[in-house]
Each structure stands twice: as C-alpha cells, then as structure tokens.
Image (tube, rainbow, N blue to C red):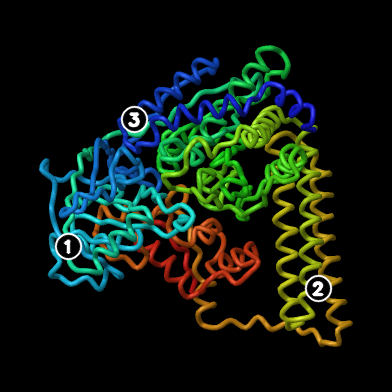
C-alpha cells in the first residue's frame, strides 16, 4: 500500500536540506526571546511561501499568562538582552547570557540598571529556608516548582541559581540545563534565575562551604503582554473538504528539540509539493496542512481559534526531536500512539512505516512504541478527536541543555524519520476505500499479534504468581485489548468505507483471538495443579462511591490547572503545572463512564495497577469544584 509512495518520496526528500533548515531555525530560537521568536515565525512563513504552499497565514494568540486556551496559558512574552551572575569578590563569571543561551531562565525579570549585589545562600530544601534570608539569592540543586517559588517570593528572595541534575554533568561538566518554565506564566513576583554548569556549581558550592558568598546579578529583560504566532500553510487536496495535519513546535532553545521537527516538516512539505506539481504523485484527495508554533499552549490557541478546521481533520502526526545522531545523543525514538480512550488505525500505519521504511533501511535504528502522552499530539484527546501519533527522540543526553546544538543533528537520521513522516501524511491524505480496507486489516493483524503476545506473557507469569489472580487479570486485559483494537479497526471508516462486513469480521476475529488466549491461560493454570477461582465482585464503600459518580469534561483538551492561578494564589490540593496529573484517567471521562469504570479502563490500558482510587475520586471532586467537570451522581 505505501511502498511505491515511499519510493517516490525518497528520491526527492533531503535530510541534508532539512539540516540546513535546522541551522536557520536554531539561529534565532536558541535565544529563547520573543522578539527573535517573531523572526523565526517570519522565516518559516517565508519558507512556506517559497516552496509554493497555499493559504499561508499567521494565527496569533495572546502571550500574556492570562488568556486560557482550553486550560493552557501562553506565558507572558519575554525579550532578553543580557544576564550575568558573578562572584562579587573575585569577578568570577558563573553564568552569562547570551554567551551561553541556556544560562538565564526564561521569563526572568530585570534587575535595576546597576544590578543587585547580595549574599547567596545554599539551600538544600526550600522549606528549610529561614525568614531572615529576605532579599538574598538562593543556590539549589534544581529549578524549583510553583509552590516553592511562591514561598521564596513571600520571603523576599529575588534570584535563584541552580544546577539541574537531569543532564549528564559528569561527562559534560560545562553543560547547562535550559529552564523554560520555572518563572512562568507571568512572574509577577519579579524573580530571576540562572542555570549553572556542573563545573560552576561545584566551584560555587565549595565557596559556600567556606563562609558567606556575595554575588552580583545583572539582568536586562522585558516582560510584557504580547503574542505568540502559529504559522500554517497547505497543499490543497483535489476532492474533499478534509485535512491531514503535521504539527511541530518552534520556540525552543535546542536544535533537536525542536528545530529538527519543524525543519523536517518544512522539508516534507517542500518535497511533497514538488512531487505533486511535477506529476510524480497525484494530488491527494485531502488537503495536507503544516502547522508550526509554540508547544502545546500555542497550538491549543490555534485549536480553539480554528476548531472548525480540527473537525475536518482526519489525522495528524507530530515530529518532536527527529534528527538525533543516535549514537552521539544516546537516544531512541518513541512512537507514541493514540490514546486507549479513542484508538485509531493510524497506529497500525505508523508502526508499519517505522518497521518497513525506517528500521528496515537501518537495522541499528533504535525505536519502540509508547503509549499516548501529552505532547503536541494532544489533538488526539477525545474532546478534540484528531487521531495523531508522535515521534519523539527521548532519551537524549543533551535534552533541554546548552549542548543541544546542530552538530548533534544527523542528515541520515532526518532522511529516515522524514520518509516516515511524508509517507504517513500523503498516504492518509490520499486514502480511499482500498486504503481504508488495508488499514482495517493491518489494525486487526497488529491487535491479534498483541493479544497473542500478551496471552503468552500471562501464561508464563503462572510460574511465579497467584493463578486465580493471573487468570482474572488475563481475562479482563485480553478482552479489553480485543475491544480496543476493534475500535481501531472501525476507525478506518474515517478514510473510506472499508465495508461493514469486513469490519464486523475483523472485530469478531479479535474477540476470538482474545477468547483463545484466555482459554490457553486457563488451561495452563489447570495443568499447574492450581484451582482457579475468580474472586467475587463485592465492592467496598469507596468503590460504591466511585461507581455512583459519572464525570463529564467541560474543558477542551488536557489540563494544566494554571488558570486557577488567575483566581487564587492557592495552595491547591493539586498544583498547577505544565501538564496536570491523571490525564490518562481524564481521557476516559466521557459522561457515560463512572469513576470506577474510568479507573478500571486506565488500569487495563496501562496493564498494571493505576494509582489509588481514593486519590482519583478526590481529584475528580477537585475538578468539579473548579468547573472542569460536571457530575451525574446517582444515589
């Protein structure tokens, strides 16, 4: 189904050209300053126009830390000119922006023009900081959270120096973590932050061990209510008023994260448009759209402002960190699939493309499938309903650091990931009944393979576990998988009528595969000599309570809880964050399932115990208190 498409695209697509785009985007994005972000957006718009895309436009959203899009706030716009932290007595420079563009925390407020000279205090735990340290700077082991920041601001702390431990400090002692959220979304407290390398942090810690250390800080920045720009354009389809979307974020400090995804998207659209114009590929049925903008929060602004387009969008794909030299970066690609609450046959296509287009050409390419997680593929959230997969190159030893630079980007890797992206996009844009039938068959085949693999795993577990419990879990999980993959099979109708009889047959085959696997597990349990008894379904008081509450979501997309900060400074039982907790549960809250059913679905999807039911009930009650969900509660 896709071999000839991939073969045609491969002749035109260029990883080397994409890497040059990486260099150009990184040239302005690496400073993390909104005035330069506008230059990035203008560059990308010019590139879309130059490669001949239609309907190129800029969709601006408010970057003021106040305007919610769904539940996301775009932080207040921030222009950065300079920032320096030095040891007062010796003049030793601990951090200097823009010499090192990761040295200054995003959204840092300006100091007075003459700077600030103050004592710096090492803090192991923020909660242990005495009140007497008002007006000083603190030095800690990592960037701090919102609750800690509030505490520091109330104590009069202006500045924070930190050395985050997620990066490889031993092998790369001059690497600095890039902090892009500690002071978001508005920083009305007027604080600033500096990221220290392991070398500088060790030097400073040794100084602090010998007595008080005074530092001078100078920060020249501007925080203001501005805009964030999404840039988009299309290759028009021939027949239908539907779209397939490729979205990749701009506006990050790194070359891999995520200049590589945006650059590869531009190259994919250049190649496809050229091939279509030259007649090497027929014009697809559906329009293909590229969308570049601010990760999650900016895209949520686009979704809210263009919901009519989202309703016409049948599929999406998100390239996020797709250019790593895997050996140099120690990386592996994760193919993140659609959520269990709204599965799709696009998973099956993406998996086959990674197997047959990318990995077959490079047996050393490292990749694995991963469950849905909140990234720019959030458009797959059931409240938006666009089935989407994401390719993300994590782990990466240079992730969110000063060393995520273009020399870590491989044209050969871009060739492989780009071919997957372009083939996925074009195949779904041109899909009709024949392709829909293939997607249904492929989704069923992959579902049956997973059921067989999972059944074998349960059978092997009998050697070490409680047979009764294993058989019960196997029965539930295998039936769940059959139902999940059955819905993925049925989703093929979105691309063309695969035939109702075929879909019904494939769903029946999945159910039969699950029944056969369950029977095998039961037989293995009986052969082991254990008497298999299924526990009764007696519910305790908590389960009864959870069974009576049916939540319905009232806010589009995944939650951050950050808009709560506009109403109150808290504290809240569940802290506002870039991505709020328990999204894997929230996905199932469709107004028909009780909290107990939601809890069970999330468990079956994860294949393990999924948290504490009491906490989940409390979380949904918290959401109801703040108008994120409504309850239909039975007595």
Task: Of the two numbered discs 3 and 2 on the same chain, state the one appearing first in sequence.
Answer: 3
Q: Secondary structure at mark 1?
A: helix
- Pointer 3 and pointer 2: residues touching (CB < 8 Å)? no
Q: Secondary structure at mark 3?
A: helix
- Pointer 3 and pointer 1: residues touching (CB < 8 Å)? no
Q: Is residue 318 visible?
A: no
Residue situated in front as seen by the camera: 503 or 612: 612
User: Where 56 sits versus 173, above or below?
Assistant: above
Drawn side of residue 63 relative to residue 240, left or right: left
Looking at the image, which residue is at 58% across and 81% down?
Answer: 539
Label 3, on which residue? 36
Looking at the image, which residue is at 86% across and 71% down?
Answer: 520
Q: Quadrant of the N terminus?
A: top right
Task: Of the two numbered discs 2 and 1 on the same chain, state the one appearing first in sequence.
Answer: 1
Rendered location of residue 596, percent (x, y): 56, 70
Q: Whole-Å distance between the Cαs marked 3 and 1?
A: 33 Å
Q: Whole-Å distance between the Cαs marked 2 and 1?
A: 57 Å
Task: In the displayed orientation, state which residue is furthest to the front.
Answer: 90
Q: Which mark is residue 560?
A: none
Label 1, on which residue? 154
Label 2, on which residue? 459
- Classify 10 Å Cα crowding around label 2: few (below 14), some (14-19), many (20 and above): many
Look at discs 3 and 2 and give the one toward the viewer.
Answer: 3
User: Where 190 sits versus 30, above or below?
Assistant: below
Q: Secondary structure at mark 2?
A: helix
Q: Whole-Å distance between the Cαs marked 3 and 2?
A: 57 Å
Task: Of the two numbered discs 3 and 1 on the same chain, state the one appearing first in sequence.
Answer: 3
- Pointer 2 and pointer 1: residues touching (CB < 8 Å)? no
Rendered location of residue 564, percent (x, y): 31, 56
User: Where 56 sits versus 302, above or below?
Assistant: above
């Amino acid at each position: 189904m896709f071999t000839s498409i991939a073969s045609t695209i491969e002749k035109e697509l260029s990883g080397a050209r994409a890497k040059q785009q990486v260099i150009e985007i990184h040239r302005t994005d690496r400073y993390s300053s909104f005035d330069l972000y506008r230059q990035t957006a203008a560059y990308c718009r010019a590139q879309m126009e130059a490669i001949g895309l239609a309907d190129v436009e800029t969709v601006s959203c408010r970057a003021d830390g106040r305007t919610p899009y769904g539940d996301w706030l775009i932080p207040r716009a921030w222009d950065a000119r300079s920032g320096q932290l030095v040891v007062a007595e010796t003049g030793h420079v601990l951090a200097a922006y823009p010499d090192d563009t990761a040295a200054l925390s995003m959204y840092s407020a300006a100091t007075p023009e003459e700077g600030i000279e103050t004592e710096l205090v090492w803090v192991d735990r923020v909660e242990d900081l005495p009140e007497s340290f008002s007006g000083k700077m603190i030095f800690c082991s990592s960037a701090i959270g919102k609750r800690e920041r509030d505490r520091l601001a109330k104590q009069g702390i202006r500045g924070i120096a930190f050395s985050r431990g997620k990066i490889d400090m031993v092998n790369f002692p001059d690497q600095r973590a890039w902090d892009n959220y500690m002071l978001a979304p508005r920083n009305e407290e007027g604080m600033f932050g500096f990221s220290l390398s392991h070398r500088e942090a060790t030097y400073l810690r040794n100084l602090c061990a010998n007595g008080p250390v005074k530092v001078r800080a100078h920060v020249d920045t501007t925080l203001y209510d501005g805009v964030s720009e999404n840039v988009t354009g299309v290759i028009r389809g021939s027949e239908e008023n539907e779209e397939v979307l490729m979205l990749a974020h701009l506006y990050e400090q790194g070359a891999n994260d995520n200049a590589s995804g945006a650059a590869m998207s531009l190259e994919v659209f250049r190649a496809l448009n050229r091939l279509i114009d030259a007649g090497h590929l027929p014009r697809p049925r559906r329009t293909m759209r590229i969308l570049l903008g601010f990760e999650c929060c900016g895209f949520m602004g686009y979704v809210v402002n263009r919901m009519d387009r989202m309703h016409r969008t049948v599929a999406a794909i998100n390239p996020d960190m797709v250019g790593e030299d895997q050996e140099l970066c120690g990386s592996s690609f994760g193919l993140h699939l659609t959520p269990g609450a709204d599965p799709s046959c696009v998973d099956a296509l993406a998996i086959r493309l990674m197997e047959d287009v990318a990995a077959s050409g490079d047996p050393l390419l490292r990749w694995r499938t991963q469950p849905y997680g909140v990234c720019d593929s959030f458009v797959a959230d059931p409240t938006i309903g666009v089935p989407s997969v994401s390719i993300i190159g994590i782990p990466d030893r240079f992730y969110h650091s000063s060393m995520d630079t273009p020399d870590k980007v491989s044209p050969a890797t871009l060739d492989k990931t780009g071919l997957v992206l372009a083939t996925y996009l074009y195949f779904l844009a041109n899909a009709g009944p024949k392709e829909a039938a293939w997607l249904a068959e492929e989704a069923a085949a992959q579902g049956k393979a997973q059921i067989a693999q999972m059944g074998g795993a349960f059978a092997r577990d009998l050697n070490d576990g409680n047979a009764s419990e294993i058989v019960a879990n196997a029965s539930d999980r295998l039936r769940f998988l059959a139902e999940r993959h059955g819905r993925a099979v049925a989703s093929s109708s979105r691309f063309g009528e695969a035939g109702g009889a075929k879909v019904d047959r494939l769903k029946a085959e999945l159910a039969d595969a699950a029944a056969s696997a369950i029977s095998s597990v039961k037989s293995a349990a009986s052969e082991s000599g254990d008497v298999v008894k299924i526990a009764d379904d007696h519910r305790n008081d908590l389960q009864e309570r959870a069974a009576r509450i049916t939540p319905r979501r009232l806010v589009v997309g995944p939650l951050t809880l950050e808009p709560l900060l506009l109403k109150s400074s808290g504290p809240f039982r569940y802290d506002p964050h870039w991505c709020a907790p328990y999204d894997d549960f929230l996905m199932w809250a469709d107004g028909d399932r009780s909290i107990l059913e939601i809890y069970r679905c999330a468990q079956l999807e994860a294949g393990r115990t999924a948290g504490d039911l009491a906490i989940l009930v409390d979380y949904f009650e918290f959401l109801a208190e703040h108008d994120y969900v409504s309850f239909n509660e039975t007595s």
